[in-house]
Amino acid sequence: MAGKVFFSVSMSLDGFIAPESPEELMGRQWMELQRWVFPQRFFRENLKLGEGGEEGRDNDILRETFERTGASVMGKRMFDVGEQAWPEEAPFHTPVFVVTHEKRDPWERPGGTTFHFVNDGIEHALDLAREAAGDRDVRIAGGGATILEYVNAGLIDEFSIALSPVLFGSGIRLFEGVDAGRVALEQVRAESSPRVTHLTYAVRER
């Protein structure tokens, strides 16, 4: 049985998931947005940052998200930033399908991550990811434009937002340009922690 297609992102209270410029990624605002992630034991283990770290519901959610993911899909913009920022052992440990116009051979990294470059659209990338994931889920990793393409194409089953107590004022909005007339949401779960509120929704066609 095929798994779900989902995305999970951190979002500011005013609806932004990233700064406008890739050069501002890893800057102050983005670091504040992701502040809930960095102390968690699973995050530290996955990026080999050393022992220790916090345990609790935030840590469980990071681990559960990783464990359910059998393959990921991302856009070229996210890949370009990550290619410079990720450690040699990239943190996915699954196949990753990059939607791009660039023709490039697969890029295999230590630890089980192989990036595959798909030149013929989001649906073919998803088909390949589903096949690679088997009965596990496919995560649409980002960035915002790629997530929106999948939402508007009716290809997302579920998503989770970690709502952080941060204001951006400008940047990349998660739902800027969403085809709201075809998307209905059903709340699945809402959980709060000292740093963030986790919201999960199932996506239904109107």
Image (tube, rainbow, N blue to C red):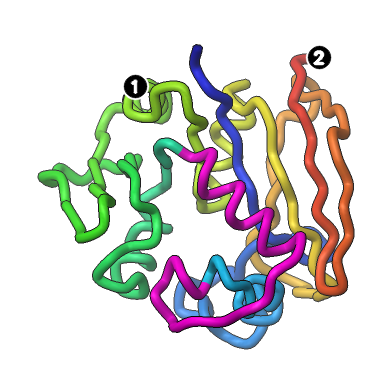
Please identify, in this view, whether the residue under mark 1 or under mark 2 is nearer the observer: 1
- Residue nearest the observer in this picture, 153 or 136: 136
Q: Are marks 1 and 2 in contact (CB under 8 Å)?
A: no
Q: Label for residue 54?
A: none
Give the SS element for disc 2: loop
Q: Label for residue 131?
A: 1
Q: Residue at x 25, y 47 (%)?
A: 115
Give the SS element for disc 1: helix
Residue 152 placement, left or right of 196: left
Task: Locate residue 67, reporting x and y percent.
Answer: 52, 44
Residue 127 image-quadrant placement: top left
| Residue receiving disc 2 | 206
What is the distance, in whole Å, between disc 1 and disc 2 at their CAs? 28 Å
Task: Locate residue 164, reporting x and y percent.
Answer: 79, 68
Hey, what amino acid is under mark 2? Arg
Quadrant containing the C terminus is top right
- What is the crowding at mark 2: few (fewer than 14 residues within 10 Å), some, or many (at least 20)? few
- Residue nearest the observer in this picture, 131 or 68: 68
Residue 126 placement, left or right of 189: left
- Residue nearest the observer in this picture, 165 or 91: 91
Residue 144 placement, left or right of 201: left
Task: Locate residue 86, reporting x and y percent.
Answer: 35, 70
In the rendered structure, which segment of residues is drawn in magenta? 44-69
- What is the crowding at mark 1: few (fewer than 14 residues within 10 Å), some, or many (at least 20)? some
Hey, what amino acid is under mark 1? Glu
Task: Please check the rendered image and state whether residue 84 is part of the magenta-colored stretch, yes or no.
Answer: no
Task: Locate residue 50, reporting x and y percent.
Answer: 44, 83
